């Protein structure tokens, strides 16, 4: 047995602290911290000692099982298939599976994994990248899902070019805070829309102009690209704010709907797009190591910095998800996970 296999076997036999649930429901009703068996890794996977894990809206969907179609995506129709929750992670490699070539035990990594609100998590090699040396584990954990979504929105779907006028709606949130910075790195003139109490954050991220969504309008009527991360502005109104050949990318804007969860706007925009000159649509983020490497380059170059609102202990996962749902978060929330930082509020 190799050293790697021995460490993997020992880790798999151990138990660990994790945020778990056995049914769908509101986070405060179903989540708890308990002891569970450590995960076993397969070919192409790594076992990561999680130092910190990011909090995003996707976790809330997985915990509540809403909207219902998410249950058909492999999470379990009646009850959850995996008791441990969480997706973002930053930590240290503790074991590697067969076929893994890019990482060794002891490497510091970040990316997405399975059940990351735990002391140990398994992750596919192609969903991880070396942690940026300029970031702490807590900062790095705030990057993967939100920043990758923002990168794909700006680069692949918005196709932002230097000098273009870009409007980011929901600019103070997890994805929005990265979208502002990435669009600026692409040379765009960025206007950020957020609540009045968060406009200072949006300015600090590099936005050229800011608009209070409660009191102001979108001002211009010819944005080249609109990235709609938050809110539920009707597509017809957004189209009036867009240039005649502009691009609308709807990333967020959810409702409490149990069937569609607010994706009606996305569906409507996509169906309308072939019949108008404007490009209207949405997308589902695909987490991957290549995009994480791109983000690492932007971070190391000082063009992108995670906006971390606060760091909470693992036992405060319920509180973190509630804060996210209330809309009071500026940027990202992060949980400290490893035993070295467990239940230590930073």
Image (cartoon, rainbow, N blue to C red):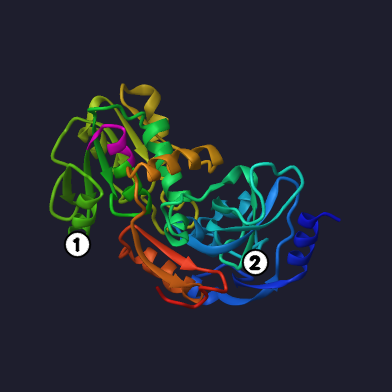
Magenta span includes 225: no
How far, Cα to Cα, is label 2 from label 1? Answer: 37 Å
Q: Which residues are magenta?
A: 182-189
Q: Does residue 194 appear left or right of residue 142 in this picture?
A: left
Are there few (<14), some (14-19), or many (20+) residues within 10 Å of tag 1? few
Mark earlier in primary sequence (2, 1): 2
Query: Can residue 244 be seen by looking at this rendering?
Result: yes
> Which residue: 55% across, 61% down?
86
> Which residue: 52% across, 75% down?
342
Q: Nearer the viewer, residue 30 or 118?
A: 118
Q: Nearer the viewer, residue 23 or 292?
A: 292
**Which quadrant: the C terminus?**
bottom left
* SS state under label 1: helix
Q: Position of residue 306 (x, y in %)?
A: 36, 53
Residue that numbered label 1 is attached to: 197
Residue furthest to the right:
1
Q: Nearer the viewer, residue 205 or 218?
A: 205
> Which residue: 48% across, 75% down?
28
* SS state under label 2: loop
Q: Position of residue 64 (x, y in %)?
A: 52, 64
Query: Can residue 284 be seen by looking at this rendering?
Result: no
Q: Does residue 257 appear left or right of residue 217 in this picture?
A: right
Magenta span includes 184: yes
Residue that numbered label 2 is attached to: 83
Q: Position of residue 38 (x, y in %)?
A: 70, 67
């Amino acid at each position: 047995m190799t050293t790697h296999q021995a460490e993997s076997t020992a880790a798999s036999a151990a138990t660990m602290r994790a945020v778990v649930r056995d049914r769908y429901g509101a986070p405060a009703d179903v989540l708890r911290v308990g002891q569970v068996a450590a995960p076993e890794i397969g070919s192409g996977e790594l076992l990561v000692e999680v130092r910190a894990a990011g909090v995003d809206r996707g976790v809330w969907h997985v915990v509540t099982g809403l909207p219902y179609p998410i249950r058909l995506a492999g999470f379990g129709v009646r009850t959850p298939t995996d008791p441990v929750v969480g997706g973002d992670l930053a930590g240290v490699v503790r074991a590697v599976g067969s076929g893994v070539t890019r990482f060794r035990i002891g490497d510091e990594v970040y990316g997405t994994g399975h059940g990351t609100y735990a002391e140990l998590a398994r992750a596919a090699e192609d969903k991880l990248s070396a942690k940026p040396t300029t970031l702490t584990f807590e900062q790095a954990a705030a990057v993967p899902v939100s920043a990758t979504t923002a990168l794909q929105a700006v680069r692949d779907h918005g196709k932002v070019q230097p000098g273009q006028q870009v409007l980011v709606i929901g600019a103070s949130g997890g994805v929005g805070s990265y979208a502002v910075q990435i669009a600026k790195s692409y040379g765009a003139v960025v206007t950020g829309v957020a609540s009045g109490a968060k406009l200072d954050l949006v300015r600090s991220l590099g936005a050229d102009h800011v608009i209070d969504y409660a009191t102001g309008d979108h001002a211009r009527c010819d944005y080249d690209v609109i990235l709609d991360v938050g809110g539920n502005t009707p597509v017809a109104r957004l189209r009036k704010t867009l240039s005649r050949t502009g691009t609308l990318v709807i990333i967020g804007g959810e409702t409490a709907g149990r069937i569609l969860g607010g994706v009606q706007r996305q569906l409507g925009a996509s169906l309308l797009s072939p019949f108008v000159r404007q490009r209207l649509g949405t997308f589902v983020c695909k987490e991957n190591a290549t995009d994480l490497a791109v983000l690492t380059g932007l971070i190391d170059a000082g063009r992108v910095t995670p906006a971390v609102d606060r760091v909470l202990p693992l036992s405060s996962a319920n509180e973190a998800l509630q804060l996210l749902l209330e809309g009071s978060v500026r940027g990202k929330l992060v949980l400290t996970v490893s035993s070295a930082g467990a239940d230590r509020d930073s």
